[in-house]
Image (cartoon, rainbow, N blue to C red):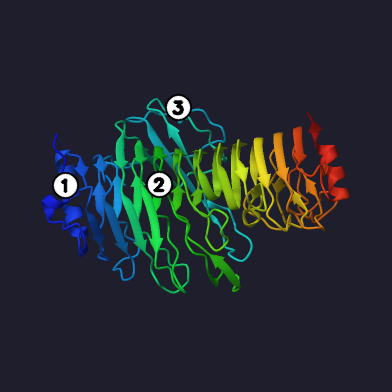
Amino acid sequence: MHPITYEQFGAAGDGIADDLPAIVQAHQHANANGLPVRAAPQACYYLGGRDLTAVIQTDTDWTTAKFIIDDRAVENNQAHIFEVRSAHAPIPLQIPVLSKGQPNLGFSLPQNCLVQVTNDHVRQFIRFGLNQNNGVPQSDCFIARQDGAILNPIIWDFAAVTQAQALPIDEAPLTLRGGIFTTLANAAPSRYDYYARGIQIRRSNVNVEGLSHFILMEGDSGAPYHGFLRVDDCAHVRVQKSYFSGHKTYWTTGSADLPVPMGSYDISLLRSIDVRFTGCRQFGITDPTRWGVYTSNFCKDLAIVDCVFSRWDAHMGCANILVKDSALGHQCLNAIGHGQLTLEGVRIYGSKLVNLREDYGCLWDGDLLVKDCVWHLPPGTSGPVSLVSATQREDHDFGYPCTLPQRIHFENVLIDDSQVAADFAGVFLLPDFNPQAADGTAPYPYGLPAALNVTNVRTTSGREVRLCQNAVLEERYRKALRVE
């Protein structure tokens, strides 16, 4: 089967002529005839600002070809350059109610599907802080087999389901391979007007291998990006041996009418399940002028293995997270969610080890395992620092009860405190989250862990690692904890 080439449809590949229309046509022809697409290895494809998206539904090999994405003047900043799209149409569902942990839908489906449900009558993730908002409708996603069995536990009780759909899971894999992409960054005003202009995956069972993304021409201002690689509304995606870039951090005015830092993630996940990054890299992970590289919302079963990223962010409802044999930089790991959160064999170079996001209530409804990790405290750290970082207000309704992980296990954790400040205030296991009431009677009390297991947690200096810096809260911890 001979692959389709972009040159067959008029692409010049000289880095000057706009090849986006030819690339769109090439994929249209390939999709209609079930043919793969292959870029010319020595080509440099210039992709201008026209409102065009190349839809990919067949294997695509970008080889060592270069792609220049010019965002300096675009017709539609919401249009992706490429969209990997499923051939299956969504299936509307009628579901009256759902229960947390429910094992079966109670009806069959045409095939295995990613099911998405929403209750518009309930608001959750009511954000607090400089980017405060009124939250979003209660939602969840899970994989259901053809017989209706639910494979990913439902995390909320749904008294009503106002919207539901099933997205059929493509059985045959689709592969994107290679490609060296360079974005010429936009110079739009620095406000929340997000650009797309990358690669969006909206099809299940996709492999991405050997892709690289670079960014040039970031100036004094710029609008943020949704993510050069977006994974939306799908399952079973693998990204391997790929390179991503941190974007420059700008400043804007947040919803509280105060200045806030604003950045772009190069990787963004939304309402997706079973997405794994392996062997991926980013340079400059401790550069504070660059925003974090990875974010996810409303996702389940996410993993990064053997990766080097400045930041890994799981918020707004993510469940079951694995970070293994990897390095995290100055923005560390930020998490909100449910289920099992695991860091194993991870090197951290930021001011926090595991940070539970304050703006969403520092929620982790599940368990935390930190094993065989090294935490390098930044030079000049004065502290105090805690292995779990949380600042829970207890006077704001986030739309759900907030809690620390119920079972926390630290095993073989080394804290490198060799470059801290002379007045360093020490290392603690659990956070002083500044409780509103010492007796736990605040309007929205923060749930405490039920079990703590600590094995071989130590500092390079020999400083003692204590439970909590706040003596009153420490006593509350001790009463709540079953120390294992």
Horizontal arrangement in the rendering, residue 14 relative to residue 179 (left or right): left
Task: Say if 117 sits above or below 483 in the image.
Answer: below
Q: Give the residue pinned by disc 2.
A: 231
Tell me if residue 303 can be seen. Answer: no
Q: Give the residue pinned by disc 1.
A: 5
SS for dot 3: loop
Horizontal arrangement in the rendering, residue 60 relative to residue 315 (left or right): left
Tell me if residue 329 can be seen. Answer: yes
Location of the C terminus (image quadrant): top right
SS for dot 2: strand
Q: Give the residue pinned by disc 3.
A: 149
Which is more foreground, mark 1 or mark 3? 1
Between 429 and 439, the residue placed more toward the observer is: 429
Q: Residues within 10 Å of mark 1 (few under 14, many from 20)?
A: many
**Label 2 – label 3 distance at C-alpha:** 24 Å
**Label 1 – label 3 distance at C-alpha:** 43 Å
